[in-house]
Image (cartoon, rainbow, N blue to C red):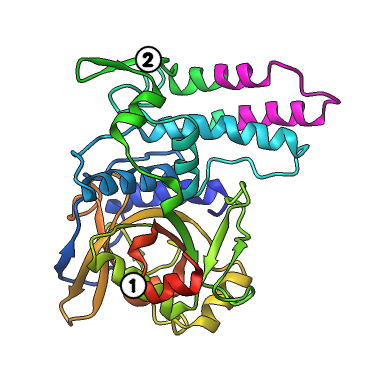
């Protein structure tokens, strides 16, 4: 994502958009295919879209394989990610990104390492709080990280100190909790209720500064773990998205939402008249010039078309249900996805066989 201040500024802008002059285009959408998904939640004033989008994705994956609908805790993954970020920052002596942002693969790494919790066990609010706002917490943690990173030895208390800060701002993480009249910890809950294998999921991107049909570490600040992405031509990336939805697979989508044509209040995202043609060359130029950045992660759950028959994708956002008339969903044009997508995360079986073969998947 871009700097967190920009993300928060965008969020505030949309929250107060009703008071602004309506300059949107009146559009009407028809759903073509909408896959099972849970209702939209609200990340509020925290830069945790990566967890909200991917937790929603996991909830849909569970429904896809026949499991019951679940309400998982997004903030459980956020809590554990901060501990991982602290350790990474210290080990790299401060030469690392430390922010609220993240990527889809982090959720699955945490799922493997720590497990998961239902929302009822951990909602991520400190006692008495009703709004997620991690700005001060991030500053406190980063200041502490810098101290540990510059010391000759980080000492033995950094993890306990990190957890103490998180407990103050996010509420204390329970060691055990009761769910459906049975006691669990995070690991046993994951084992019983989330039968997903992280090795079945891959990140896909499309840029020309690395060879196609290979993997590379995508050079964005929030890929702080150095995760590798599969690189495919643009047409292949779009074929993957279409094939996945047609065959019942949703997608965790990462892309740029800072364009004038992205209007959550109106419920759509379209390219503007001044935007370049959505092709491979222009995608690369915008990425190289930092004009296309990973502002926001959302959950792609279906397809639709507008009043002119133009294709769109149905996107589940994490800005609550009250900012537009679509219960927190929006319709993103195919051309917008072509130009402004940074990466997608999905089950490898959602990729066409001929492309999987080229990727050796």
Residue 266 showing in the rendered view: no
Q: Write the residue at 42% across / 42% down.
A: 51
Q: Whole-percent x and y of residue 242?
A: 30, 72
Label disc, if present, on residue 255 of the rendered structure: none
Q: Residues within 10 Å of mark 1 (few under 14, many from 20)?
A: some
Residue drawn at 52 percent across, 46 percent down? 102
What is the C-alpha distance between the residues marked 1 and 2?
A: 46 Å
The part of the chain drawn in magenta is 138-164
Q: Is residue 145 magenta?
A: yes
Q: Is residue 301 left or right of residue 104?
A: left
Q: State the residue position of label 2.
A: 176
Question: In the image, is residue 25 above or below residue 21?
Answer: below
User: Can you identify the residue that label 1 sits on?
Assistant: 270
Q: Residue at x 37, y 14 (%)?
A: 176
Local secondary structure at mark 2: loop
Q: Earlier in the sequence, mark 1 or mark 2?
A: 2
The foreground one among 188 and 32 is 188
Using the image, determine if residue 280 lies above or below residue 7: below
């Amino acid at each position: 994502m871009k700097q967190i201040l920009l993300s928060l500024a965008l969020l505030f802008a949309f929250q107060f958009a009703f008071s602004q002059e309506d300059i949107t285009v009146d559009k009407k959408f028809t759903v073509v295919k909408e896959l099972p998904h849970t209702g939209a939640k609200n990340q509020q004033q925290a830069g945790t879209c990566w967890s909200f989008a991917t937790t929603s994705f996991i909830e849909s994956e569970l429904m896809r394989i026949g499991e019951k609908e679940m309400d998982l805790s997004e903030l459980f993954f956020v809590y554990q990610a901060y501990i991982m970020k602290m350790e990474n920052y210290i080990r790299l002596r401060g030469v690392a990104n430390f922010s609220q942002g993240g990527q889809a693969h982090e959720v699955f790494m945490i799922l493997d390492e720590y497990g998961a919790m239902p929302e009822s066990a951990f909602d991520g609010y400190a006692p008495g709080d009703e709004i997620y706002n991690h700005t001060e917490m991030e500053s406190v943690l980063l200041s502490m990280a810098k101290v540990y990173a510059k010391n000759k030895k980080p000492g033995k208390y950094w993890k306990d100190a990190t957890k103490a800060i998180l407990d103050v701002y996010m509420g204390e993480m329970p060691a055990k909790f009761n769910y459906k009249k049975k006691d669990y910890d995070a690991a046993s809950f994951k084992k019983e209720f989330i039968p997903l294998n992280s090795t079945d999921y891959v990140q896909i991107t499309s840029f020309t500064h690395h060879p196609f049909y290979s993997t590379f570490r995508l050079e964005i600040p929030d890929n702080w773990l150095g995760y590798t992405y599969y690189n495919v031509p643009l047409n292949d990336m779009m074929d993957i998205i279409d094939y996945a939805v047609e065959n019942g697979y949703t997608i965790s989508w990462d892309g740029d939402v800072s364009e004038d044509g992205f209007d959550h209040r109106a419920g759509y995202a379209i390219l503007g008249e001044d935007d370049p043609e959505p092709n491979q060359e222009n995608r690369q130029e915008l990425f190289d010039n930092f004009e296309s950045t990973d502002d926001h992660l959302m959950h792609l759950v279906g397809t639709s078309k507008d009043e002119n028959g133009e294709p769109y994708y149905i996107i589940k956002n994490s800005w609550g249900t009250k900012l537009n008339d679509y219960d927190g969903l929006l319709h993103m044009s195919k051309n917008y996805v072509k130009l402004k997508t940074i990466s997608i995360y999905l089950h490898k079986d959602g990729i066409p066989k001929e492309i999987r073969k080229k990727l050796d998947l």
